[in-house]
Amino acid sequence: MSIEIRNVSKQFGNFHALRDVNLNIESGELIALLGPSGCGKTTLLRIIAGLETPDHGSIHFSGADTTDVHVRERGVGFVFQHYALFRHMTVFENVAFGLRVKPRGERPSDAQIKDKVMNLLKLVQLDWIADRYPSQLSGGQRQRIALARALAVEPKVLLLDEPFGALDAKVRKELRRWLRRLHDELHVTSIFVTHDQEEALEVADRVVVINKGRIEQQGTPQQVWDNPASPFVYGFLGDVNLFKGRANDGRVHLDDGTQLDIPDAQHADGAQAFAYVRPHDLEVARYVPSQAQDAEGRQRGMVVQLSRSIVVGPIARLELLPEGGTESAHNTAPDALIEAHIPAQQFHEMGLRDGETLLVTPRRAKVFLDQAAGI
């Protein structure tokens, strides 16, 4: 089942939840709607489901206009964040519910229902708890039962609203992998809403980044990670450092004297520039004044002080203060810190200590010109 969203807008009072959204979803695709709270992603999911009606625009399932089709007739399965299981029913009866309430002419026999439910419970690897009640299950088990119940009616489209948001980090990670494997088996067109960047990048075939009711960017996880289309996307897809400066002669001259080459901006002389650098793209070395400039006399990197180091597992997180104190305007973080990530082994081999003066050099930066620096 393919889905086409055409020029969809939705307003609640003075709040514009969606603004002229256009999106095509291929049959069998697993799509993540990613964005911060209030960006419109859940509203879009509810419009696709038929739980909300757009003010403008239309929804098409496999070419047919379904904008005014009732939710019961759309053939969608819906999985909510908080499970929505019936507490008074066993696991088996929860999964069977959608089959038992079908019109008499479409309702399977009891034997067919039993076979289908048990097959679904085996699919979600929970056939051994068919007689238990929701209160006797863990959060991860409840969410898998909710998914089995949604699949019982053989939906053409599966919609998941923050399906793992109420679970702890370890269970979320396990269920993400499990959902990806399940989708590869079933190939049901699926759309899930999340504000978790790692979840979207790990699970989805395609990520749709939404901000203030508009689609900022869409593409494969690798595409949106490697080539963010806007400062918002760059900042939202993980930790990032922001440095300000001016573009001139194909270079960005940062406020501290550091220069970055940007061949794409040869004709942007004097334009305000915003350079985004991920923590793992900062090269860290001890500051040696005689080695801090290149052959042309340009400063090689940024002189910083190691304020704090956090070593957990294989990564050392370094919190760095730009030379000149805590009131630097280099970084958008409230405390003006620059964050760098280096291998823990490198950290120990260098013998770094808090308070040391270091030189950090961006290996890779994404530069945007003449744009407000809002992450």
Image (tube, rainbow, N blue to C red):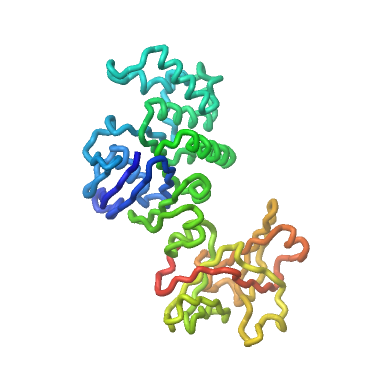
Placement of 139 over or under 308, stated as above or below: above
* Residue 143 at x, y percent in the picture: 48, 32
- Does residue 298 appear to the left or right of 56 in the view shown? right
* Residue 368 at x, y percent in the picture: 45, 71
Task: Report the number of discs.
Answer: 0
- Does residue 38 appear to the left or right of 249 in the view shown? left
* Residue 12 at x, y percent in the picture: 26, 48
Location of residue 279 by image quarter: bottom right
Location of residue 357 by image quarter: bottom right
Placement of 129 over or under 267, stated as above or below: above
Q: Tell which of 95 and 243 is nearer to you.
A: 95
Q: Quadrant of the C terminus?
A: bottom left
Residue depicted at x 49% and y 77%: 263
* Residue 7 at x, y percent in the picture: 26, 52
Placement of 367 over or under 236, stated as above or below: below
- Does residue 45 appear to the left or right of 202 in the view shown? left
Q: Quadrant of the N terminus?
A: top left
The residue at the far bottom in this view is: 296
- Does residue 14 appear to the left or right of 131 in the view shown? left
Placement of 313 over or under 305, stated as above or below: above
Residue depicted at x 72% and y 73%: 286
Residue depicted at x 51% and y 27%: 123
Residue depicted at x 37% and y 48%: 41
Location of residue 19 by image quarter: bottom left
Q: Tell which of 76 and 316 is nearer to you.
A: 76
